[in-house]
Image (cartoon, rainbow, N blue to C red):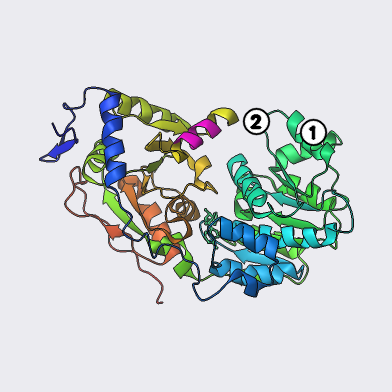
Amino acid sequence: MNKKIRAKDGKLDLSEFMNDNDLNAYFKRQAKEYIDPDEDKSLLTDKNRYFHELNLIDPIIHALSDLGYHHPTPIQIKVIPVALKKKDIIATAQTGSGKTAAFTIPIIQNIFIDKRKGKSYLRALILSPTRELASQIGDSITEYAINTKVRQVTAYGGVSKIPQIKQLEKGRDIIVATPGRLMDLIELGAVDLDRIEYLVLDEADRLLDMGFIDVINAIINRIPVRSQKMLFSATIPNPIISLGNKILNKPVRISVGRPSSAVDTIDSYVFFVEKHDKMRLLMHLLSTEKMNRVLVFMRTKHRVNDLVKRLRKEKIKSSAIHGDKTQIERERILNRFKNKEISLLIATDLAARGIDISDISHIVNYDMSEEADIYVHRIGRTARAGKSGKAFNFCDRKERRYLTKIERLINKHLIRAENYPYMSDITPPTLTILKKK
Ligand code: AMP
């Protein structure tokens, strides 16, 4: 018997689903069926360029090649040579562009070269807005530095300080940290920033959005003025310009053109739907589209929990990730999502930044993002490193103004979905007027 959920006249028929096992089997089957049409041409790396042209040393080039990185991405081509010269940088880079490697690799190489002369002490600080992003940056450094003696420690809240302190006592070259935990460790005397030579503020716009400006100022005041500073941000609003003016010394400005951003590599559809019909529409899409790994974004943790419960009643299994979950729970859920044990993850924007899970097939913006740049981050969860993906945006009558904001920011119209059930009766809004290209 075919257990696929079917939409009949726009109405869902879930009767064939007896239990969660059936549903899991259904998702597993879908995962098998799903073939990424762009698999071969997926990476937005520049196939005519190689890492050795960027003055990288063999131990690092070998580590990259073992990871399957054969060609650099545009942001890496621009950032690596400048960063190796220890110049300050302000870079606009989207998630999924390969920015983490762009700033970590030169730091690893410079430390490796210097370190031959002495032992480990903290030379580099990378600040990240979220624990998840910090953990991913830390893991990437460990991978890229595998053939060097450069070692990192990752420090974030929500978990015990003791293992972090023990690692610091052993001697570490790089610390990747969230601002709050870093301050705790400084106050405990476990971290000393006196000899920092490299500072990176990753997702700087997000760091400021999250209200970390005072902590960042306090941290910067403890760092030697002559250290190399790199500021990476998806957007460059005024507060970032002020921060840059304050801390950067003759920075090189770097941005990669739109073609490399997720905004252009994924098909983003808008569905005009009323708020009370959104769940039915989601269920319809789950049943009719090949959605093998789906990340759904909602505005509040309350709404996330509520949707998970309502889906469960309909025998659709999903997991929630938001700020109320402990760090351990969040990591466990993300790992299960990465390992494909979970196919449907419902999240608040906490999960929108930095989470690096390749081949998420679909992003569903169940609630439109109120801020246009959050949209860019959300859809940056799919189309990682140039893979293709789809985004479905559910836009109710009150959210139409957010759609306009998004379309203005990305200077592109989202595709208007056609012939779908639960379409709102209200006349669709007129197309946003875009800037001339
Ligand atoms: P990021 O924008 O730093 O979050 O990186 C996005 C993804 O691209 C990560 O999964 C990286 O491991 C991967 N990646 C970064 N640079 C390269 C490269 N040159 N070749 C292949 N994959 C890469």
Q: Camera-side residue: 296 or 427?
A: 296
* Left or right placement of residue 325 versus residue 270 in this view: right
Q: Where residue 26 sits in the image (x, y, percent)?
A: 26, 35
Q: Is residue 123 magenta?
A: no
Please tell me whether mark 2 sits on a helix, a strand or a loop.
loop
Quadrant for ligand 1 reads bottom right
Which span is picked out in magenta?
A: 331-336
Numbered badge on residue 158: 2
Q: CA distance from mark 1 to mark 2?
A: 17 Å
Q: Where residue 311 sits in the image (x, y, percent)?
A: 31, 29
Q: Where residue 295 sits in the image (x, y, percent)?
A: 40, 42
Question: Looking at the figure, which quarter contains the C terminus?
Answer: bottom left
State the residue at coordinates (65%, 30%).
Answer: 158
Q: From the image, tell me which residue sits under label 1.
A: 166
Whether residue 276 is visible, yes or no, is no
Looking at the image, tell me whether mark 1 or mark 2 is earlier in sequence order. Answer: 2
Whether residue 43 is visible, yes or no, is yes
State the residue at coordinates (28%, 32%).
Answer: 25
Quadrant housing residue 251: bottom right
The kind of residue on which mark 2 rests is Gly
Question: Around disc 2, counting alpha carbons within 10 Å, would you say few (fewer than 14), some (14 to 19), or many (20 or more)?
Answer: few
* Left or right placement of residue 292 versus residue 181 in this view: left
Q: Residue furthest left?
A: 9
| Callout in the foreground (1, 2) | 1
